[in-house]
Amino acid sequence: MEKKNKDQFVIAHLTDRQHTDEVLAYSIHLAERLRKGLLLLHINDSRYPTLVTDPEAFLKDLQQSAQQQNPQIPVSYAALKGRSPEVIETLPTLLNGVVAVTAASLEAGRKSPLHTKNIIKDYSNSKIAYLVVRVQQPFCPIKHVGLTVDFHRESKEKLIWSSYFSRFGASQLHVIYHDYKDDGLRQKWYNNMRFLHKFYTNLGLTFTPHIVPQKSAAVDADALPFMAESQYDLLVAVTTKEKDILDSILGTQEQRTIRNSQNLPILFLNPRDDIYVLCD
């Protein structure tokens, strides 16, 4: 392990040699935007057949490549061994991570760390946000960020992270929602929107509201086609806090969102009792 200082880091979670370009591109971009260091991580997890026989050499080569792409960003690396969920859970304390970037493939086998279900499981206890990018998709700077607001309390979880893209990267924020007809749901949604408006106003941020037709119960699913058509670059989403029987049968919303046919990167947040605040 090589760790240069105690600064906060964007974690580039690199699972194999074949899929590094996408993860590095977005990790460097986030490190630039958030003004953080970059840490390259490989986890040797016995559950997955690893394609990296010499993790230290693998990460050291990538460190040089990342440093050449942006000499202003301090780049470190760590090769760790253990079960991925347990290692990932320690990222904020062990490696001072603030956000992780990892790659997903719809063609990956069930024993691959690139499989979407494995990513959701491995990051299920993550205390930091994690950005999932699709393999073999060209990098696109994050200029337009979409976040959905529905009637669930967890909608508020997205506000802090969404604000970082505007505060540190001058991204434009787009708030997407359904036009609820039910009075009870509409009131809960309205309360979330009031909270959002107050939060952004206090930070001096603006956003553009968008109503999308309600074709499903989940606003994320309805937002993705709209976002792709509008050429947005990222969706900020919250994972399911309390799963019910229907989630067990049909899968959670995040399991469907991560496999979106629009190939949009998704920044996932796990609901938590304490709010993680990025140091300025």
Image (cartoon, helix red, strand yellow):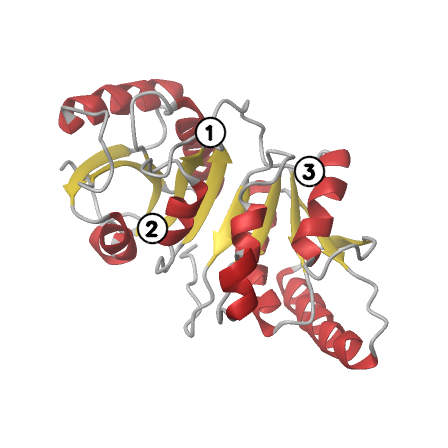
Provide the residue designation for mark 1: 107
At a point 31% along the width and 38% down the height, the residue shown is 111
| Alpha carbons under labels 2 and 1: distance apart | 18 Å
Q: Reading the chain from its start, which is encountered first: label 2 or label 1?
A: 1
Does the image show residue 205?
Answer: no
| Alpha carbons under labels 2 and 3: distance apart | 27 Å
Pointer 3 local density, CA inside 10 Å: few below 14, some 14–19, many at least 20: many
Q: Reading the chain from its start, which is encountered first: label 1 or label 3?
A: 1
From the image, which quarter does the N terminus lie in?
Answer: top left
Disc 2 element: helix
Residue nearest the observer in this picture, 44 or 126: 44
Disc 3 element: loop
| Alpha carbons under labels 1 and 3: distance apart | 24 Å
Which x, y percent locates residue 15? 30, 33
Q: Reading the chain from its start, which is encountered first: label 2 or label 3?
A: 2
Residue 244, compared with residue 44, is above or below; it is: below
**In contact (CB < 8 Å): disc 2 and disc 3:** no
Residue nearest the observer in this picture, 44 or 89: 44
At a point 61% along the width and 46% down the height, the residue shown is 235
- Quarter assignment of residue 273: bottom left
Provide the residue designation for mark 3: 232
Label 2 amino acid? Asp
- From the viewer's perspective, is 85 left or right of 154? left
Label 3 amino acid? Tyr
**In contact (CB < 8 Å): disc 1 and disc 3:** no
Which x, y percent locates residue 9? 33, 44
Tally the marks. 3
Which x, y percent locates residue 39? 29, 38
Q: Of the numbered discs in the image, which one, if any, rests on residue 148? A: none
Label 1 amino acid? Glu
Q: Of the numbered discs in the image, which one, if any, rests on residue 122? A: 2
